[in-house]
Amino acid sequence: MTIEEAQQWARQQLAHSDDVRADVFALLSFVLDKNKTYIMTWPEKALTEVQWERFQALVSERVKGKPIAYITGRKEFWSLELETNESTLIPRGDTETLVEAALSLNLPENARVLDLGTGTGAIALALKSEKPNWQVLGCDKNGDAVALASRNARRNSLDVEFFQSDWFSNVPTDKPFDLIVSNPPYIEEADPHLSQGDVRFEPLSALVAKGDGLDDIKNIVVGASSYLVNGGWLLLEQGWQQADSVIELLTKNGYKKVNRWQDYASVERVSGGQYVTAERDK
């Protein structure tokens, strides 16, 4: 079985996939341990029997709907290769908007930064990769996610500390932060998209927030002020129709310079503001 023949077979199996070509390249690249350029350049190369059997097994998993990132155990985010598993969400390109928003702020050279609900550590590690002098910490209530994020820090040789905390429950108050970022659960419990696509395989606890999908965001907005320096920033990823509600929450809770940032599809994906005390406001 050549590379080209393996691709043709896989395209037939994955005909109903949203992006057949990308899926085939990703799985074949993983099995062969070669990049896309190699696959395109050497279509006549033969797979070994072991490689062919493994490729068939992985394609079968994808046919069942299992996300590529869970099949291969890896996902690229902000040019970093991250280990992924089913303990937490798969990093998505839309979340890079949160990284871009954070990097656009006027923060100290040695800013202290906290990533709440860090998951794979994607946001924290992306920020550290761009700002090596920042002191970046990440926390998650899921111990398996904390272990995963720590492995990703070592994998990418980035000095980020990860620890277990249910939002702010174990976050120390003696050293406030210049920036707090979070991609919290924000999907409503009855949202029909939860039964579609990759999210079917992702942990509901990392996707769903009670009520209108804003409960966790509300908790973070209210709680963050106790952990921010005077003039510190809070940035939050949100659902595609939640920007106005999050902006209102930030404004009502004393945040200034409240703003919103669009993702690559022009969706208002991130909202944030600067927490300024009354004394500084004067």
Image (cartoon, helix red, strand yellow):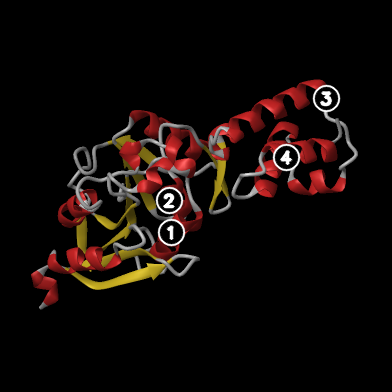
Q: Residue 28 in the image: x percent, y percent?
A: 72, 37
Disc nearer the start of the sequence (4/3): 4
Q: Residue 237 in the image: x percent, y percent?
A: 35, 57
Between the C-alphas of marks 2 and 1, the distance is: 6 Å
Secondary structure at badge 4 equals: helix
- Residue beneath the point at 17% across and 47% down: 173
Amino acid type at mark 4: Gln
Amino acid type at mark 2: Ile
Between the C-alphas of marks 4 and 3, the distance is: 21 Å
Between the C-alphas of marks 4 and 2, the distance is: 36 Å
Packing grade of label 1 (10 A; few <14, some 14-19, many >=20) is many
Q: Which residue is mark 2?
A: 123
Disc ID at residue 12? 4
Comparing labels 3 and 2, the label whose residue is closer to the camera: 3
Secondary structure at badge 3 equals: loop
Say whether marks 3 and 2 touch (CB < 8 Å): no
Disc nearer the start of the sequence (1/3): 3
Disc nearer the start of the sequence (4/2): 4
Q: Residue 179 in the image: x percent, y percent?
A: 30, 58
Left or right: 27 with respect to 168? Answer: right
Left or right: 251 with respect to 40? Answer: left
Disc nearer the start of the sequence (2/1): 1
Disc ID at residue 99? 1
- Residue beneath the point at 19% across and 54% down: 218
Say whether marks 2 and 1 touch (CB < 8 Å): yes
Secondary structure at badge 1 equals: helix
Disc nearer the start of the sequence (3/2): 3
Q: Is residue 1 above or below residue 139?
A: above
Front residue of 168 and 136: 168
Q: Is residue 228 above or below residue 117?
A: below
